[in-house]
Image (cartoon, rainbow, N blue to C red):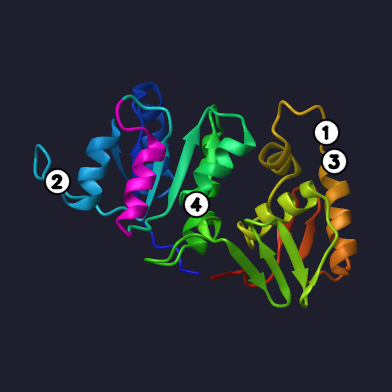
Amino acid sequence: MQELTPGAKILLVDDEEAITDNLAPFLERAGFTVKVVGDGEKALRLITGASTEHGEVFSPDLIVLDVLMPGLDGREVCRRLRQRGNWTPIILLTRVGSPIERAMALDEGADDYLNKPFDPYELVARIRAVLRRARPGVPPLSAASHLSCGPLELDRRARRVLLSGSELPLTPKAVAVLDYLMTHPDEVISRERLLDAVWGWDYPTGTRAVDVRIAELRKALGDDPANPCYIETIPGQGYRFLGLVEARP
């Protein structure tokens, strides 16, 4: 994982000036260097070094990218960058509440997403977490089809979890929780965030459902909550996945 550098360059792409006029100064006060762009086409030209009106080129360390924009939307910008082999970290800003829709965006190569409206402090935390785990030129864990951590293996497409070569009998929601934790290693994930990511806020359940699935995972993994190898409880905050997660072909 790379070390955070002071003044990491952020490209903020959003057509809503009411958002960018407030968010850009906030990110700058958090220590980032920020460039604001109002549409996807110009963002692509800046990032790829194509000609622009003023001959500008900007090589960001991370892109904060709105999904719903006129013309070239955020998901299409993400797709085109990944197709060109550009793996600059991307956080999508979306109003879409469906976990399936957000999962599709991650499969296309985004590193993370945040629902609008959002707390700007949460965005800063997400930016720092993504920058910590990003490796230059390497696809994010969220784009991998297989993940591993020691003897633990997750086949994300088949939705299968193996421990030392044996498949674990897990419910689909437990697999989805494990998937989210493994694609965000060493990051404290709140129960509310897991609920939003796995169930969606329109689902009639509470955060207790998250704890039940965590207990299911720990039992299947033989993970002692008092001395965990995989899932750590952070009192009053949520859960964190421990260990080095690697993408596998």
Question: From what the image shows, is residue 154 above or below residue 123?
Answer: below
The mark that comes first in sequence, 1 or 4, is 4
The residue shown at (76%, 69%) is: 162
Question: From what the image shows, is residue 68 above or below residue 105?
Answer: above
The mark that comes first in sequence, 3 or 2, is 2
Residue 193 coordinates in the image, percent (x, y): 68, 41
Amino acid type assigned to the residue bearing label 3 in the image: Ala
Under tag 3, what secondary structure? helix
Are the residues at dot 3 and dot 1 in contact (C-beta closer than 8 Å)?
yes
- Name the magenta segment's main secondary structure: helix
Query: Magenta stretch: residue 80 in it?
Result: yes
The mark that comes first in sequence, 4 or 2, is 2
Q: Which residue lies furthest to the front in this view?
A: 158
The residue at which mark 3 appears reads as 209
Under tag 1, what secondary structure? loop
Residue 91 coordinates in the image, percent (x, y): 46, 45
The mark that comes first in sequence, 1 or 2, is 2
The residue at which mark 1 appears reads as 206
Residue 53 coordinates in the image, percent (x, y): 9, 37
The boundaries of the magenta stretch are 71-85
The residue at which mark 2 appears reads as 56
Mark 4 surroundings: few (<14), some (14-19) or many (≥20) residues within 10 A: many
Are the residues at dot 1 and dot 2 in contact (C-beta closer than 8 Å)?
no
The residue at which mark 4 appears reads as 111
Amino acid type assigned to the residue bearing label 4 in the image: Asp
The residue shown at (9%, 40%) is: 54
